[in-house]
Structures are given as C-alpha cells and as structure tokens.
Image (tube, rainbow, N blue to C red):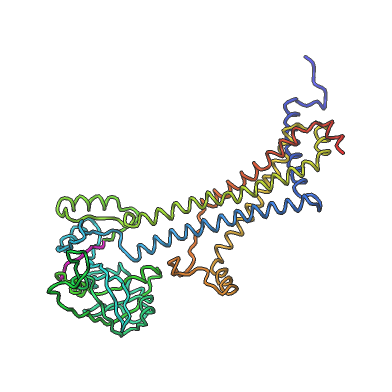
Amino acid sequence: MKKRKTGDTLPGFRNKVSEEMDIRTEFFLSWKYFKPKRSAVSVITLISVIGVALGVAVLIVVLAVMSGFSDKMRDKLLDTTSHAQIRPKFRTMVIDDPDRIAAMVEKAGGEALPTVIAPVLLQKNDTFVPKAVIGFDPARTTNRLRLDDVVFAGKYSLKRGEVIVSYVIARELGLNVGDRILIHSSTNIAKLFRRNKDGKIELAKNSELYLPSEFRITGISNFRKYDFDRDFLFMNLDDADELFGLDWGTATAIYVWTDDPFHMDRFMSAMRKSLKETAPLYFIESWKEINGRILGVLAVEKNMQFFLLVFIVLVAAFSITNTLITQVIQKTREIGLLKAMGATSGTVMRIFILQGFYVGVIGTASGIVLGTLVVIYRMSILRALRFLTGQEIFPQEIYLFDELPARIIATDLLWIGLISVLLCTFGGVIPALRAAKLDPSKALRYE
C-alpha cells in the first residue's frame, strides 16, 4: 500500500479548511464593501440605515400606542363598570327582586350590586345639560366602584339627597362641593307630552306639573376616563328609585364582579343556567360582550397599522437594492478579479446579500432603541410640541384619556425585528444575482 508523504493532507480536511476560508472571506469583503471610504456609496448606505431605523422606530411607536390604548381602555372599562351585568330582556321592565338575583350571583361565587342607570337633565340656574345617573346602595358596595379612591374634593358620601359629580360636570356647570343642583327625571319629562292623532306633539291631558329634585354635591370625582366622567354622576339607590318613579328597592341592572374578569366562562355559564331556570326574564352579559365592538375595533386597528407600516420598511429595503446595484457597478472589476481567482458565483452573491443583512441588523437595532426612547419619553415630547405649536397635541376630549398610553410588547419587537431584517436581506438579492452573473473576462475589461 502506498504511503502518504509528509505534509500531505486529507482531501476532506482540505475542503473543510477551504470552506472556512471562503466563509471568512465573504464576511470580510462584505463588511469592507459595507463601509467603503468616503464616497457617494457610503452616504447612500448611511441613508439606507437611517431609513430602516426610522421605519422600525415608527412601527414600534405606533404599535406601542395601539397596545397602550387597548390596555388603558380595558382597564378603564373595568374600573368604571362591572365584570358583567344582569338586565331585563325588555327595556320597559325593571328588576323588582334584585335581592334574589344578587343571592344567585353570590352562590355562583360573584359579588352583586343592584343599580339604577337612567338619563337625567341637570339644571344650574338657566343652564340645562343631559347626563346619566348611576344609583346604588353605598352600604352594599365593597369598593368595587372605587368612588372613595377617585373622589378628590369633598368626601365619599351618598346619603339621601346627596350626589357625587365628576370634575367634568363640575367644570361644565361651575359647581363646587356643597352646591345644590336640580335634577329632572327623564320619566317625568316624558309624561308631560304625547302625540295626537295627527302625529303632532302636544301637552298630555291630565298631566301634572312636577318639581325637579334638588340634591347637594358632597364630592367631585375623577376616574381619568373622559367620556365616563363627562356623562355620569352618582346618587343613593332610594333617591334614584324615587326620582324615576320606581318602587323602592327595585333596580334597572345588577352589576356583577368576579375574582378574574379575564377567565369567567365557567361563572357565566353557571349564571346563564340559573337565570334560565329561575329568572327567565333576565339575562347576563360579560364586560367583553358589552364592549365587544370597541375592543374588536382596537384589535383590528392594531393589525392594520402593523400591515400598513411594514411598507415603510419595505421602501427602505428598495433603497438598499438601489445602493447595492450602484455598488455592484462600481465594483465590477473587483468582482471580475474575485471570480478569476476562483471565487464562485455563490460566494459573490453571498457577499452582497450579507451587505443587505448588515443594513437590516444595524438599522433595526437603531430603530428599536430610537422607538423605545420615544415611547418612554412620549409625554415630554408631547409637552415640547405643545409648547412649540401652542396647540394641545393629545386632547382628552377626543382621545378620552389624560395621557398618551403606550406599552411595548416583546413579541411585537421580535416580529418587527425579524420582518425588518428579512426585508433588508432580500433587498440585496437582485444586485447579488447581477454580481453573480458577471463574466470575469468582460468584468476585467470593464472601463
């Protein structure tokens, strides 16, 4: 058997070393081309990186704000209402046995609070504004409505003849703690008029004049949810029953709370079964079902924003393609020399694809840092813009909250980073194919 001479290497080992050298060469050349000396190409490369960074930053900020809106809306819905509500199936009905229904709720493991919710007309001097009343027995509540936490002026007291109004209502009518306000019941107003045979509105026959009810303001609240603060005030359940001509102790709805508002399927099934068997004129809805439309809109908007804003990164990927095509033209002779020295088309192709990858990684990382900083200091940025422009950038009358909510989700960052790097990498495919197809002899004769 023929012996191998000293210095000979195994063919497989030689091929492995050659592949490792090819890989190192590809990374070296791609990085060298990525940061060339001062030239138009280096400026275009920098612009491409900035474009990717800005696109990623915008994506992060928008998705963080949409996530924050969803979370804030969900939290405020749970703060200002119950986890579920039991109501009559017909609007003209009331719950005349709320204690029995409340006992069913407690038996199923929940907490119940009979309430009266109805529209009213507030009067201060000659000013009238439409609002809504939530009446409940303060002795029965277990701090679920958080009124004692959100009353910042006066005190939490709802004895007979007392009401608590929000800061929005107080500001709208110029009210303070201790002031008295007149409340007109929608029921009494409706009794004053009727339609005749011709369809015209006229005073009802045998209608009795009524006097509005007078209440004293004991507290001013702020739930920090503008639409709720704008529309609702609170009073004692007996006062609400009397105001709307209901029997004492009756309710128009029963607020229900559970231990976990996000996992209440078993509780809802048990309550629906109990109501069907013993109180078929009533039904129960969870907070997700009551507010399903607005929660669904927020989820759809977030997905649509993500889909649309990905096009910003896609535009940046096209700029990378343009940059690399320019670079391929400038490096034609060098590419021809590489191929003449034995570099394969795959090697040349990977060199330029790696450049797109570098732009994607650096741009994405910069964009994540920039977007995160914008989200963290968003309120300072809004205050600065308000100072410079003289306009309220985030009016709570429109957006309902007193601050811009935002929350960065790790999975969102992961998807944004992955999609951005992939788009930028694919942006280098077309110029890489062009470079790989260059004929060495023609490339060396270039210019």
Q: Residue at x 18, y 60 (%)?
A: 103
**Vertical side of 260 occupied by 168: above or below:** below
**Vertical side of 71 occupied by 121: above or below:** below
Majority secondary structure of the magenta segment? loop
Magenta residue check for 26: no
Residue 88 at x, y percent in the picture: 20, 58
Question: Nearest the camera: 253 or 22?
Answer: 253
Question: Nearest the camera: 120 or 394?
Answer: 120
Task: Name which quarter of the figure residue 250 lies in.
Answer: bottom left
Magenta residue check for 251: yes
**Vertical side of 403 occupied by 155: above or below:** below
Residue 398 visible to an observer of this rendering: yes
Residue ranking furthest to the front: 198
Q: Residue at x 43, y 67 (%)?
A: 400
Task: Name which quarter of the figure residue 345 lies in.
Answer: top right
Residue 89 at x, y percent in the picture: 20, 56
Residue 293 at x, y percent in the picture: 37, 54
Q: Residue at x 58, y 57 (%)?
A: 58
Residue 447 at x, y percent in the picture: 87, 39
Q: Is residue 18 left or right of residue 54?
A: right
Q: Which residues are magenta?
A: 248-255
Question: Nearest the camera: 248 or 130?
Answer: 130
Question: Nearest the camera: 133 or 61?
Answer: 133
Q: Is residue 187 left or right of residue 27?
A: left
Residue 260 visible to an observer of this rendering: no
**Vertical side of 446 occupied by 283: above or below:** below
Q: Quadrant of the N terminus?
A: top right
Q: Residue at x 23, y 63 (%)?
A: 253
Q: Is residue 320 left or right of residue 98?
A: right
